[in-house]
Image: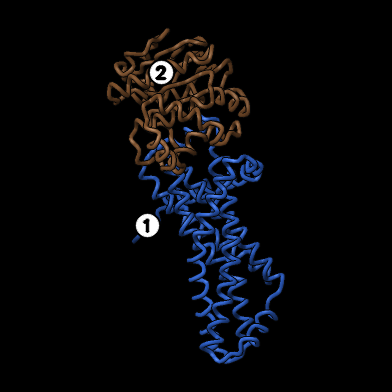
Chain colours: A blue, B brown
Amino acid sequence: MQIINIQKIGGNVINALRDLKGCYSLFCYFIRNLLVLRIAPIRSVLYRQIYFTGIEALSKIAIIGTLIGIVIITQVANIVGLNAVLTGRILIWTVVRELGPLFAAIIVIARSGTAIASELGSMKVNREVDSLRIMGIDPIDYLIVPRIVGITVSVFILTFYFQIMAIAGGLAFTSVFIDIPFFQHLKGIFSALSLFEVVVSLLKSLVFGLLISTVSCHQGFTVQSSITEIPQAATRAVMQSLFLVFIFDGMITVISFT
Amino acid sequence: MIRLENITTRYFSSVSFEIKGGSVCKIITKSDDEKTILLNTILGIRRPISGRVFLLGKDIYSIPEKEYIKVLKRIGVVLEYGGIISNLKVWENVILSVWYHMGKRPGDVEERVIEIFKEMGMDPSYLKELMGRLPGPLPVYEKRLIGLVRAMLTEPDLMVYDSIFEGLNPEMLEGLIKLTEKFHLEKPGRTSIYISSNALSMDSIKADQILRLSN
C-alpha cells in the first residue's frame, strides 16, 4: 500500500506559501516604486520588454486568434444552424469574456514568462545583479519594475488584438464559407457586445499580466549560484503563472457574471 | 577611506585594516572565494557575520539605502569578468552608470570613451563595430576594458580593480597597468585598490600599502 508522504506534501505547501509571500513582497515593492520609470535607462528596459513581449508576439496572436475565431464559428454554426444573431453572441461570449484574455496570457507565459525567469536567473548566476548593485543601481528598480509594467501592458494589448482577430476571422469565414450574411452576423455581434464585457475582459488581461510578470520575475530572482537552477526556475514560473491565471480567471468570471 | 573592524565571515575571522585616502593598495587573498567574499563585504553586498565596514567614512551596513547608494556612486569597480550586463549592447554597458546617475547620453561621453580605448591600442574602426555588439562572445580582456571604461566615466573617488591583470599577455598587461596608474593620478585624493588571489599578476603595480589576508 502506498503511504502518503506527509513530509513531501508539507514541504511543497511551505514552498508554495514562501513563493506566494515572495511574489506579494515583490508586487508591493513594485507599486511603491513605480516612479522609477522616470529614469531614462529604466524606461529603455520597459520599451524593450514591450517590444519582445508585445510587438514580437503580434503575428502569432493574429494567427491563433483568427484560427480560434474560425473554429468557434464552425462549431457554433454546426450546433445552432444559420442563426446569425446567436452565432455572433456565442462568438462574443467565448472570445471576449474568456478566450481572449486566457489565450493572450498563455502565449505570454510560454514566450516571455520562461524567458524572463531564465534571463534573470542567469544574470544572478553570472553576478550581473551584483554588478548593478555595485554601480549603485537597485536591481529590482532596473530589472523588475519595467518588466512588470512591460508585460502587463503587452498582455493588455495582445488580449485586445486577439479578440479583434478572432472576431474578424470568424466574420470573414462565415461570410465566405458558411451561408450567414455578413451584415446580419455583424449586427448579432454588436448586439451582444456591451461595455461591461469589454471592461471585464481588459481587467482580466491586466490582472493576468501582473500575475505572470510578478511570478516570473520572482522565480528568476530565486536562482542563487548554480546554472542548473535556471531551468527549474523557468518551469516553476510557467506552472505557477498558469495556475494563478486560471484561479483568477475563475474568480473574476464568477464575480462578474453571476 | 576604507576601514574594516574585526570582520568575520565564513572564510576569515577578525580581519581589521585601514586604507588611507589617496593611496594605492594591493590586497592579496589566498583564494578566489576569499577574494570575492572580502570584496563583497567591503562593497556592502554581503553582510559579514560580525564586524563593521566603513566605506568613504560611512558604516555601510547601518546607513539607510539612499545614503548607501550615494556612497556607491563615488566608487568605480572593475570586476574580473568586467561585470558586464549581457543583454545590453557594449555601448549601453559603457554608458549605463553615467546615464543612470547623471543622465549623460552617448554623445556626452563619446570623446572620452574613444580616448581610453585608443590608449589601449584599439583600432577606431573595430571600436565602432564593438560598440554595437552584445558582450557575450567577447574575450575576457575586452570585457574588462568595457567594465574599466564604464567605471572611469563616473570619475570615482575610489577605484577597485578585481583581478583584472590575470591571464593577459605582456603588452596588454603593461597597457592596462599604465592606464590604471594614470587614472589614479588624474584626480587628487583618488584611492586605488587592486585585489587578487594571484600576487604575481599584480607584481608590477607600485603600491603604498600591501595587505595579505590570512587566517
Gap between marks 1 and 2, in whole Å? 59 Å
Mark 1 against mark 2, which lies toward the viewer? Answer: 2
Q: Residue at 50% of width from left, 61% of height from top? A: A57
- For image coordinates 44% across by 30% down, the residue present is B147
Can I make out residue B129 in this image? yes
Residue B49 visible here: no
Q: In the image, is A114 to the left or to the right of A152? A: left
Q: Which residue is mark 1?
A: A3
Q: How many marks?
A: 2
Up-down: is B59 above or below A37?
above
Residue A161 coordinates in the image, percent (x, y): 58, 67
Chain of the residue under label 1:
A
- Tag 1 and tag 2 share a subunit: no
Q: At label 2, which amino acid type do we have?
A: Tyr
Could you tell me the amino acid type at mark 1? Ile
Look at the numbered disc 1 and give the secondary structure of its residue: loop
Q: Would you say B32 lies left or right of B66 here?
A: left
Crowding at label 1, few (<14), some or many (≥20) Cα neighbours within 10 Å? few
Binning the other alpha carbons within 10 Å of mark 2 as few (below 14), some (14 to 19) or many (20 upward) gives many
The one nearer the camera, A58 or A203, is A58
Quadrant of the frame with the C terminus of chain A: bottom right
Residue A243 % position (x, y) = 51, 60
The residue under the point 53% across, 51% down is A49
- Foreground residue among A132 and B133: B133
Check residue B194 in the rendering and tell me which mark sits there, or answer none. 2
In the rendering, which numbered label is found on residue B107?
none
Closer to the camera in the image, B151 or B8: B151
Location of residue B32 (image quadrant): top left
**Chain for numbered disc 2:** B
Secondary-structure class at tag 2: strand
Q: Quadrant of the N terminus of chain A?
A: bottom left
